Amino acid sequence: MIHNLSSQNSIANQFLAQLRDVNVQNNRLLFRENMERLGNIFAYEISKHLDYKEVEVETPLGIAKSNIPDSKIVLCTILRAGLPLYNGILDFFDDANNSFVAAYRKNHKDGTFEISLEYITCPDLTGATLILIDPMLATGASIEKTLESLSEYGKYEQLHIVSIIASSFGVNHIKRLYPNAHLWMAAEDEELTAKSYIVPGLGDAGDLAFGKKLQE
């Protein structure tokens, strides 16, 4: 299932517009805050697709019945760019277990690249609702590589993939590989450059959130 926040008008569009705006991007604090805000919105929307159970809550005046989530949630983010978006989602899922993956593009002289995973930590995924967080879904290679690595930690029950901006190419690639996944995005952009950067996109989310790095 494809869930695109831009398909209808909401405050999410304002947060996304500020993330894209070159005149606003030099404010790193606001950039991270807007990623977290979108994370909050994604978490709320994802919560509608979880399993629930009824509980009784004692109030000062009696007993109230309430439906609360009954899913085993595991949040996984790809470092470092995914951290602010991840924090926004974690704000809403208090008891979630967490997984972290360090992945980067390893560029070759001929202009091609491969995804290199250098670090992964993960709880048991058996029966879990896995929420995989990567702010930019370009080719889908990082998502594919990460999910291949996570398969060693158990079979999850439900998969949600969360990105701020996704390319049409990446969306189609992930849909083909994981047809039962929920794919969440704030916007879908059609163009990819020869180096697989999303256009118009928003630039390097990691650099904009945390500062430029020497490594390329």
Image (cartoon, rainbow, N blue to C red):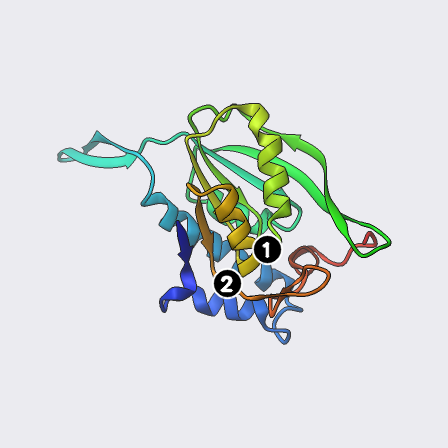
Kindly tell me whether residue 134 is visible in this rendering: yes
Between residues 130 and 147, which one lies in front from this camera angle? 147
**Residue ID at (69%, 55%):** 210
Examine the rendered structure and indicate whether residue 126 appears above or below residue 73.
Answer: above
**Residue ID at (61%, 61%):** 29
User: Residue 136 has which mark?
Assistant: 1
**Kind of residue sitting beneath label 1:** Met
**Kind of residue sitting beneath label 2:** Glu
- Where residue 105 appears, as percent x and y from the top left, is 74, 48
Which of disc 2 and disc 1 is earlier in sequence? 1
Neighbours of disc 2 within 10 Å: few (<14), some (14-19), many (20+): many
Examine the rendered structure and indicate whether residue 160 appears above or below residue 157.
Answer: below
Kindly tell me whether residue 163 is visible in this rendering: no
Examine the rendered structure and indicate whether residue 10 appears above or below residue 48.
Answer: below
User: Residue 188 has which mark?
Assistant: 2
Marks 1 and 2 sit apart, C-alpha to C-alpha, by 10 Å
**Quarter of the rendering occupied by the C terminus:** bottom right
- Where residue 43 appears, as percent x and y from the top left, is 41, 47
State the count of labels.
2
- Where residue 209 appears, as percent x and y from the top left, is 65, 57
Q: Residue furthest bottom?
A: 23
**Residue ID at (60%, 70%):** 200
